[in-house]
Image (cartoon, rainbow, N blue to C red):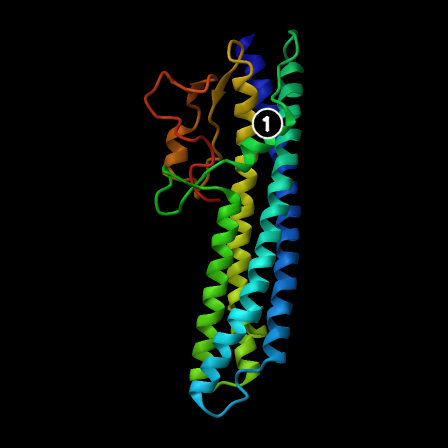
Amino acid sequence: MAESRNTQIADALTERQLQVGRVETQLRREAWAILALLESEIVSSLKSNDPTDFVLLVRRRREVETLMAEEIDPLIQARYEQLARQMDAAMGRLAVQEAGVVQRSVQGVRDEPSLGTPADTALRRRVADSRFPSPATPTDFSTTGADWWQRQGASVAQRVGDQLMVSVSLEESLTQAVTRIRGTSDQAFTDGIMARARDDAARLVRTQTTNAVGEARVAVAERNVPRLVLRHSSLRDGKTSLICIARDGKRFTADPAHTPIGHSLPFLQGVPYHPS
């Protein structure tokens, strides 16, 4: 009977993942919409202050430096700050919803008193303060989602400045300089700086979504230690990482220590164990 109940709970939460996937898709589109605005702002600034419209290389390079410092860098910083705020708010809402889903999913198959759930404000703070693993060291703590957005913004600004310097050094036209930002139509605009920015944003949205769901489920478990345990469930396909394959099906205690049950793999910071 207990196993049947656990299976029903697992099935309910698996079905929930399909809904979470739709939420992630919408959030990714919202992030891309902000980046589309940023792209148009960068191009507009570039056209209004054309650094290619000078003969001397030293003047063109100086114009790029001025343009980056006074206009493009602040534009990028502002848009990525907007992304950080918007995604933090969205992940907080998702976590609160997820806590309710977990409560209903468990309660639906157990004739017992309702589960306790964390306060909404505490859960939002927990999600906002979560530290994600870095790509280089997946099992180590890294930094928060907001900090990752800031790092992405700094990376975009660096790439834009570098490419504009290359462009003016090669005596390219304004059209060619803009192409370095947008990409080419022949490649469906997948070869420009902003294409990589979109890919990076999608990866971070996916990671933040996974984190929000995971933090909500763990938070509910920690409020109901005598009644629940945590069980790691990995999607098993050709892309599944070794760290997730190893943890698939493994159980941990619901208390904050999250002690392994029947195995020795550490819980670490919980999901996500790596970007994406």
Q: Name the one closer to the observer, 88 or 187.
A: 88
Residue that label 1 marks: 122
What residue occupies the far bottom of the structure in this picture? 55
- Residue at x-position 49% and y-position 85%: 172
Looking at the image, residue 25 sits to the left or right of residue 272; the answer is right
- Asked if residue 189 can be seen in this view, the reply is no
- Asked if residue 230 can be seen in this view, the reply is yes
Residue 264 lies, with reference to residue 184, above or below; the image says: above
Q: Secondary structure at mark 1?
A: helix
Q: How many neighbours does mark 1 have within 10 angstroms: few (below 14), some (14-19), or many (20 or more)? A: few
- Residue 261, percent from left and from top: 39, 16
Amino acid at the residue labelled 1: Ala
- Residue 263, percent from left and from top: 34, 20
What residue occupies the far left of the structure in this picture? 264
- Residue 56, percent from left and from top: 45, 91
Q: Name the one closer to the observer, 82 or 201.
A: 82
Image quadrant holding the N terminus, namely top right
Looking at the image, residue 140 sits to the left or right of residue 38; the answer is left
- Residue at x-position 60% and y-position 32%: 124
- Residue 242, percent from left and from top: 36, 37
Q: Name the one closer to the observer, 71 or 194.
A: 71
- The image quadrant that residue 219 belongs to is top right
Q: Name the one closer to the observer, 16 or 227.
A: 227
Looking at the image, residue 124 sits to the left or right of residue 225; the answer is right
- Residue at x-position 48% and y-position 59%: 154
- The image quadrant that residue 223 belongs to is top right
